Image (tube, coloured by chain):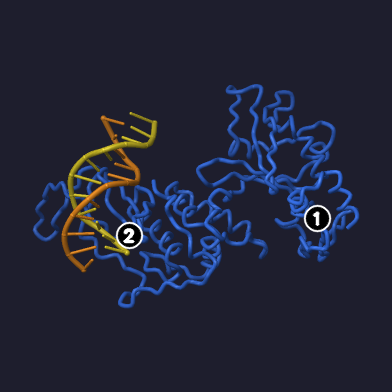
Chain colours: A blue, B orange, C yellow
Amino acid sequence: MDISSIDESTTSDSISITPPPSKSPPLKPPPNSLCRVGSGASVIIDAEIGVEAESRKLPSSRFKGVVPQPNGRWGAQIYEKHQRVWLGTFNEEEEAARAYDTAAQRFRGRDAVTNFKPLSENEDEVEAAFLSTHSKAEIVDMLRKHTYGDELEQSRKNYGGKNRAPAENGGDTAARARGQLFEKAVTPSDVGKLNRLVIPKQHTEKHFPLQSGNNSKGVLLNFEDSGGKVWRFRYSYWNSSQSYVLTKGWSRFVKEKNLRAGDVVSFQRSTGPDKQLYIDWKSRSITNGVSGRAQPGQMVRLFGVNIFEVPRNGVDSCSGKRMIEMEILGLHSSKKQRVINAL
DNA sequence: ATGTGTGTTGAC
DNA sequence: TCAACACACATG
């Protein structure tokens, strides 16, 4: 694997790569003259003569960036700077072709020559935004893991406002990229004296590793918050209530973040090879003007510097950031609260 | 044992 | 830049 060598230069700047002058995308698949029979060794049938010829030769793909594999599957690859970037292997030739298309658009811009791509140009804005907010390495990683479609879908769902994270600058976002696992609006008991957070069952089964027989005492999970602070929670199953819960460590989080019933905690997991877990939170509804909290449109200032503008359109992903900004500035939690109340 | 994806080469 | 080919080596 050589993803690490992918350099990151064309991200937020407008596409400067010019398409090949003589070609006009999209590439249309040529007539189906080759038949792939079964899997493994290829058999090429000459349709004209009707003679079946055994051949060790692998069938060429009709698609750009797609190469046959010895076992009948298909590989996708793209070249950049004298180097091949492997995009993974796929069961279907078309699947590999789509992977190439995606990579081509990320590597070479919207006008890149592709196999299918410009078929649906309407909803492409979201995908274009998605591509531009992920590094090449991340996109390649998704393609190789066959998770690109899911990630894109996630991003569509989260596409509520314009407060998307800014594009990466040095290609360093590979370690930061994360996919949303789930969110929960915390209940009064989640932030009360029970010192636990109930994780909705459908989410635990989908996202969290605990298997009932496996670990009755639960496991310790590390979550990183937006300020880079790591929180360790015990994650376990409570037979009494038949629920999955975060216990030890949770109350400290509630206290430091000053979580209140109705606030939303969200969990993410790194999309990269490391499976780092992340936790973040946002206020229930800033527009409701919960006492002691910032109002919409208000500029949060600290030491004379504008650090955060409270969004006017209700809850969004930035609403917890004042805490984080203060953490960066090294304030203790008690002081943080005082600063907030003073705002 | 199987399959992936890299090393390599030569054409375009 | 690109795909064809062979096969080292990763994977289970």
Q: How far across and down, in percent of the image, does residue A65 sit?
A: 32, 59
Camera-near label (2 vs 1) is: 2
Please name whichever residue, A267 or A90, is drawn nearer the observer in this view of the structure.
A267
Q: How far across and down, in percent of the image, does residue A320 sit?
A: 75, 52
At horizontal 79% and vertical 62% (from top left) the residue drawn is A310
Discs 2, 1 touching: Cβ within 8 Å: no
Please name whichever residue, A119 or A254, is drawn nearer the observer in this view of the structure.
A254
> What chain is tagged by disc 1?
A
A219 lies above or below A72 = above
Q: Are marks 2 and 1 on the same chain?
A: yes
Amino acid type of the residue tagged 2 in the rendering:
His
Residue that extends furthest to the bottom in the rendered view of this protein: A21
Task: Say left or right for A163 vs A69.
Answer: right
Task: Say left or right for A198 vs A10.
Answer: right
Q: SS of the residue at dot 1?
A: loop
Q: CA distance from mark 2 to mark 1?
A: 52 Å
> What chain is tagged by disc 2?
A
Please name whichever residue, C4 or A288, is drawn nearer the observer in this view of the structure.
C4
Q: SS of the residue at dot 2?
A: loop
- Report which residue position mark 2 lands on: A82
**Which quadrant: the C terminus of chain A?**
bottom right
Mark 1 Cα within 10 Å, few/some/many (few <14, many 20+)? some
Q: How far across and down, in percent of the image, does residue A121 sit?
A: 48, 70
At horizontal 53% and vertical 63% (from top left) the residue drawn is A132
Please name whichever residue, A24 or A242, is drawn nearer the observer in this view of the structure.
A24
- Report which residue position mark 1 lands on: A285
Task: Say left or right for A131 vs A244.
Answer: left
At horizontal 76% and vertical 33% (from top left) the residue drawn is A196
Mark 2 or 1, nearer chain start: 2
